[in-house]
Amino acid sequence: MKIAIYTLTSELHNEQAVSAVTQEFLNSLKLKMDFQGADYTLYGTHTLDLIYVRTGGTEGIFRKLLPTLLKQSEKPFYLLTSGKSNSLAASMEILSFLRQNGLQGEIIHGSAEYITRRIQLLAQTSKARELLKGCRLGVIGKPSDWLIASQVDKEIVLQKLGIELVSIPMQELLDLVKETPLHDVEDFEMPMTPEVKKNMPGAMQIYAALTKLVKKYKLQGFTLRCFDLLTAVHNTGCVALASMNSEGITAGCEGDVPALLSMKIAQVLTGVSGFQANPARIEPETGEMLLAHCTIPLNMVERYELDTHFESGIGVGIRGYMKEGPVTLFKVSGDLSRHFIAEGELIRSQAEPDLCRTQQVIRLKDPSLTHYFLTDPIGNHHIVIPGYRKEILENLLGD
């Protein structure tokens, strides 16, 4: 991530004195930054561009500079202040002017520790937006028939996130599966039941066909109407999705596009796609929830086992065991008008026979947030992300 510093300085102030303060202030932040000074030629080309308002009396300078900056970048304006030489007062006037003109901005001000943390967070967020912009996500087959509340607005997704949603007929995948040779079951070293051993070559055949489809359409991710595979090829996509997620291709289940968008956001921010699951049980008094699904990214688990797919009893499902500890539950709506974020603890994984194979018991930090699931949920699937991620998710979605 490249962070650039540009400066605004009034001619009334002594440059030597201002330069000394500048050096002391920037050194206190302990960040690697590209100092551009008053030369704004490269403004907008870095991951994060900061305008360091070094002194008061710079409001008019910024106003004259603004038309040029707007041509170079559409990002919010981040005004860095040291708290000296009326830097904060000038920044407040500039930010008020920006708001009056319908433009976004923020003053970055406080202790050196706070400023450093805030700049790092903004840089991460900006990098994530860069990674999302231009993404092509496939929708292979239509969303599953039961996802009646999980529609998506493609134009809004393109406008707000820069993500293009590409519709791909399910039949195209099925044709590719038929053309793809089966793997030799002896290639797999994991312990397998006879039923899993019988179905594993077909599961890998689906993986190979999906890999071809991703390459053909130049996708960075997809969601799959996976239950159609049960009747069409008598197998499941669980192994394929678990593997592809661990390889950096965001892969979701059941044609759920809002879940896919949530997973892609998670991936660019954290490096993992997250665990797409649906709540099976909720305890409002304690904040405990049981979430389950038959696949989980292999790069999210400490270990995993192979089993059959729960609902059908055929194919190959994944029972994954994630490290216990901090997690975040996350979901965006299909028109990006809403999102849900809740932090909690993964307190245990389990393996009940009458649920999808990967099962996680999560206790929310705020038990009252369980009422969201019972009164105003964004569909059924939600994404489990390792670690406390609320701050950076809010930062990305809140602007």
Image (spheres, rainbow, N blue to C red):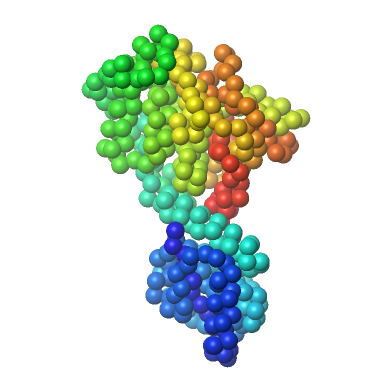
| Depth check, front residue: 265 or 246 | 246
Q: Residue at x 73, y 35 (%)?
A: 367
Q: Position of residue 270 (x, y in %)?
A: 50, 45
Q: Position of residue 6 (x, y in %)?
A: 48, 74
- One can see residue 30 in this view: yes
| Depth check, front residue: 343 or 27 | 27
Q: In the picture, residue 332 is in which quadrant? A: top right
Q: Quadrant of the C terminus?
A: bottom right
**In this rendering, is residue 393 above or below 329?**
below
Q: Quadrant of the N terminus?
A: bottom left
Q: Position of residue 281 (x, y in %)?
A: 65, 23
246 lies left or right of 293: left
Q: Residue at x 47, y 38 (%)?
A: 273
| Depth check, front residue: 168 or 398 | 398
- One can see residue 66 in this view: no
Q: Position of residue 29 (x, y in %)?
A: 57, 67
Q: Residue at x 50, y 58 (%)?
A: 123
**In this rendering, is residue 105 above or below 214?**
below
In the orientation shown, which residue stands out farthest toward the right?
Answer: 285
Q: In the picture, residue 206 is in which quadrant? A: top left
In the orientation shown, which residue stands out farthest toward the top?
Answer: 194
Q: How many numbered circles are shown?
A: 0
Q: Residue at x 41, y 69 (%)?
A: 72
**In this rendering, is residue 182 above or below 30?**
above
**In this rendering, is residue 206 above or below 386?**
above
Q: In the picture, residue 208 is in which quadrant? A: top left
